[in-house]
Image (tube, rainbow, N blue to C red):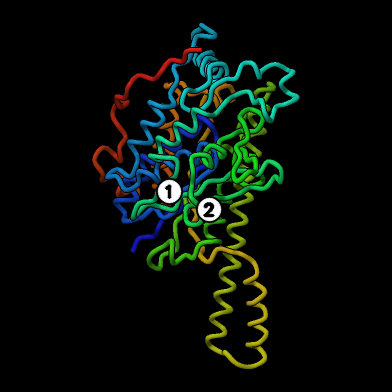
Amino acid sequence: MAADVVLVLQGGGALGAFECGVWKVLAPALRAGGHRLAVVGGASIGALNAAVIASRYTEPDQGTAALERFWRESLATAPLPFMPLPGNYFEAWNGLLTGLFCGNRSLYRPEYLNWSPLAGRQRIARPFFDTVPMRRTVQELLGGPVYEPQPGSPVLFMRSTDLQQGTSETFHSRHHRITAEMLRASGSMPLIFPAIALDGVPHVDGDAGAHSALGGAIDVLREVDPRQLFGGDEPPLLINVELHQRASDELPCTGLEMAHRLVNALQAGKSDADLALLASEAEHAEVMRELDAMLSIQPDGAAARLVRQQLARLKLRRAPQVRPRIVQIGREALPNEHVSNFFDYSPVRIDALIRQGMEEARRCLQRELPELARCVEAAPGRAGLPAAPPQFSRPHLHTV
């Protein structure tokens, strides 16, 4: 029986279009290889992408078309000519300034009165943007205010950050009702977007804490009996889709380039730390299994009593009871990304990110999972890569 899959989608604003491209390739490849998506989740925009996949997973295409419509129709925003000059550099600025000054009708809208310096004294109550549009969008994605899993649907998880305690919190559909407000909280960048109250506690973006979205997957593996998550004896396959670059070939020069480099290093560093934690806890689980095996061979005697004492101490630590195989899908920065960054939702950039996600997913499959890569190559249209951009309705223009 093929291994079940845990899919982790990191946050990064408009960069999340890359994850749409990755899923366009992964979904048919996993289906052709007999793999089942058991868990999917993320933080910030990754949580929204995960919600689309989970809520539409039982459809014939496992949500690939719905996710692409989400990006190309709901989120794509035609840029206004703030800088009416030719060239990709100025197009990046137009996309960024449109996202900042006009908002995104499906995610956030500017609160211009709150842009006054005086509003900074009440920033918790007067954020720069309002995310009511995000609530409406998420409810449309879920088909209601709550994620209602269907038979065969994966476990959905999302991460947010307790603003007062500074701790990263995981909510997953095995133990919680995943609501539109939870997903809205996961995407609420501090200072810029409002904090969202969950059970009376203000929560902000899941990427604002000390852990990446991988921490949410670790929590699910800790808290849920693997027999309830996975079928068969094969260890699960954990696929982490990373949007940020750990290293850069070029030294940043401008302030904007420096800020972009530092954010990338910070976010990628959190993913590295969570991967190291997952490896450590997997070794912990392996030791526990070995101790159990020793007791089954020699259940009596002084040595057995010592083993039981050690085993009891180890079981006090929460650790995943399975050791997943980890596959990373990363990306290189596109041109002028230090300008476009999180807020450029222009159709050209979204298309470039989706196509980059498809190509990087194929390369990863060929490198890490060649048996699935062969399934991709054998599929008609090479797992959905169109010869020309697909036809969607025209992206919307903002009215201010």
Percent coordinates x, y for residue 130 in the rendering: 57, 26
Q: Is residue 246 visible?
A: no
Look at the image and tell me in which quarter the N terminus lies: bottom left
Q: Is residue 225 above or below residue 359?
A: below
| Residue for point 47% across, 52% down | 173
Q: Nearer the viewer, residue 79 or 162?
A: 162
> What amino acid does circle 2 point to?
Ala
User: Which circle marks residue 367 in the picture?
Assistant: 1
Q: Which of label 2 and label 1 is nearer to you?
A: 2
Q: Secondary structure at mark 2?
A: helix
Q: Secondary structure at mark 1?
A: helix
Q: In which image quadrant can residue 351 be found?
A: top left
Q: Nearer the viewer, residue 392 or 191?
A: 191
Q: Is residue 122 visible?
A: yes
User: Which circle marks residue 61 in the picture?
Assistant: none
Which residue is under mark 2? 217
- Which badge, 2 or 1, comes first in the chain's sequence? 2
Percent coordinates x, y for residue 374 in the rendering: 31, 49
| Label 1: how many Cα within 10 Å (few below 14, some 14–19, many 20+) | few
